[in-house]
Image: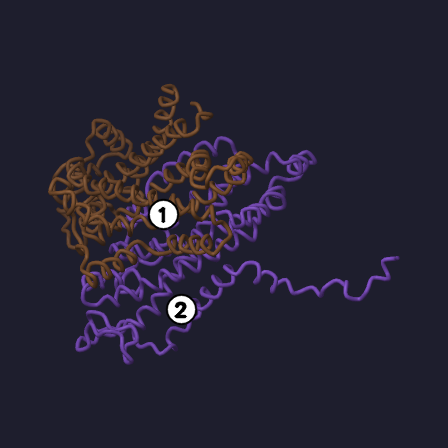
Amino acid sequence: MTANSLPQDFAVPRQRSRLFDTVRRHPTIVLGMLIMLLLAAVAIFAPYLGTSDPMKLNPVFRLRPPSERWWFGTDHLGRDLYSRVLYGSRISLQVGLAVAVVASVIGTAIGLLAGFVRWIDAVVMRIMDGLMAVPGILLAIALMALTKASVQTVIIAIVVPEVPRIVRLVRSVVLSLREQPFVEAAEATGTRFHRILIRHILPSAVAPLIVQATYVCASAMILEAILSFLGAGTPSSIPSWGNIMAEGRQFVTVAFWILGFPGLFLTLTVLAVNLLGDGLRDMFDPRMRRRL
Amino acid sequence: MYAYLARRLLAAIPVIAVVALFVFLLLHLSPGDPAAVIAGDLATAQDIDRIRAKLGLDRPLHIQFVEWVWRLAQGDLGTSIFSNLPVSRLIGQRIEPTISLTIMTMIVAILAAVPIGIVAAWKAGTWIDRSIMGFAVLGFSVPIFALGYFLIWVFAVRLELLPVQGYTPIRQGLLPFLENLILPSTALGIVYVALIARMTRASMIDVLNQDYIRTAHAKGLSRLPILLIHALKPAAVPIVTTIGIGVALLLGGVVVTESVFNIPGLGRLTVDAILRRDYPVIQGVILVFAVIYLAINLAVDLLYTVLDPRIRY
């Protein structure tokens, strides 16, 4: 019997699309992505989603509970909470994305340097140890205490405590790769340094970097909310989730919705980013799958 | 062992030095005149000059640093601009609630997380495991202050089971002390529980796949002793490491939790100091937190030798 005589039934099954395959195997990535896209849409199209001016005072209708007219209720100044929460998503997404990108770029640059240059490594890693010995919130608070509050300064203040995580990751990738035969071979054949960096080192660092950047994004969103909540973050004139909650804290017993809705949105957003990160980690490193 | 301890303490010096330098430079790296920033928007030129002289900002930078470190070495953390009290005394007054909250949270979280992780590992792959891990991801995502207010709303406002906010020192009775700490330590501990439960599960799954566990099953031991005696001890080293790492998370969370629950601890001291731009206090608190963090990590490393006799220093 030859291979040609195999019955039709044994034909190779039709290849399903790779996209479908990914979706089936990594539901958390899809779920995380969907929520994120939805939130991005909300942030961008906030003016068209039945919102009114989020700053408009309306003292007659103070502390109204959620109803048909005010979907999320109103705050102590009669401002429409639904509008404020929707506009607030802009700040969280902005800060989360900006911190993830900036911290990754700076952290990668420092991590590569530390991995390749011995004397820089010693100095840089001591500095990173020092930064990591202080709780991130305190570090960010201290930085904020010295500058005028704005969205940019909030981003910078959060980048500083997040950078060490990226530096450590990139440095460890570099150190493990430098011993690999293919890198030694490249060095031996006289490949230029920047070429080794770009062609041989960076590609291996990209996957763990993306995963780590996702976690940095999640933690940045929480930090921004905490800073604003403590009164050391986004200027209180801007409706960010942390600011809305800070204003609602004295009404926790009578108007819980002021705290509840922004809190729910914040939790959901961070959850989506974390799901995305966990899914990506499983996808890039199947050995770790279902373990952590 | 003592040689190791000495080496570790020596290794902590550069870290503390970096923190100290950072804390010192914070005031000088800021754009603009730090004295003006501290004085606030309403200050006159005389006010600014007074603050500048008081902080020694009118002298050369390196001299300021040497003097500052010299005083630091003598335990002098400076004087609060706002209350004129020594920072070390302010910290001393506020440290008790923070320590109570941290220790209570660690105890509650570890007692909850380790059994949860063990169950998840034992039932790995089942719906029980998956829902536990789902809750862990949720635990990582919910911000402490959102959870804190949710707990206040449910247990204090709606059900009226527990006090809304506040703190009672342990001297005034164990029961009110605990009553006041239940909600804050739950809110603070949830991230910690998620972290430890995940690591417990991962570590236990590794150990449960070992041959000697199969042998234990084969010789007819029941499940509980296998899980708790044969598996948990070798699985403990990564768990303890995570407990140590998580302390940093916990110390950061303390600042927020104390604000939510109106606990007069170090966190509240810091937040008040920021709102008043009371810089010596912020510097002092950051240094104290860094020292606590390093001390706990050292303690964790020393614990390894107890848990795993193969590790010797």
- What residue is shown at x 24% (from left), y 61% (from top)? B154
Q: Nearer the viewer, residue B222 or B299?
A: B222
Q: Nearer the viewer, residue A60 or A270?
A: A270
- Viewport quadrant of the N terminus of chain B: top left
- What residue is shown at x 30% (from left), y 70% (from top)? A84
Q: Secondary structure at mark 1?
A: helix
Q: Find residue B286 and report its horizontal and vertical position in percent.
A: 27, 40
Residue at label 1? B193
Q: Find residue A55 and report its horizontal and vertical position in percent.
A: 26, 71
> Would residue A204 appear left or right of A52 to someone viewing this image?
right
Residue A128 seen in the figure: no
Q: Amino acid at mark 2?
A: Ala
Colour given to chain B in the rendered image: brown
Q: Nearer the viewer, residue B101 or B207?
A: B207
Task: Report in which chain the residue with disc 2 lies.
Answer: A
Figure check: B8 above or below B191: above
Question: Which of the numbered marks, if any, corresponds to residue A43?
Answer: 2
Q: Are marks 1 and 2 on the same chain?
A: no
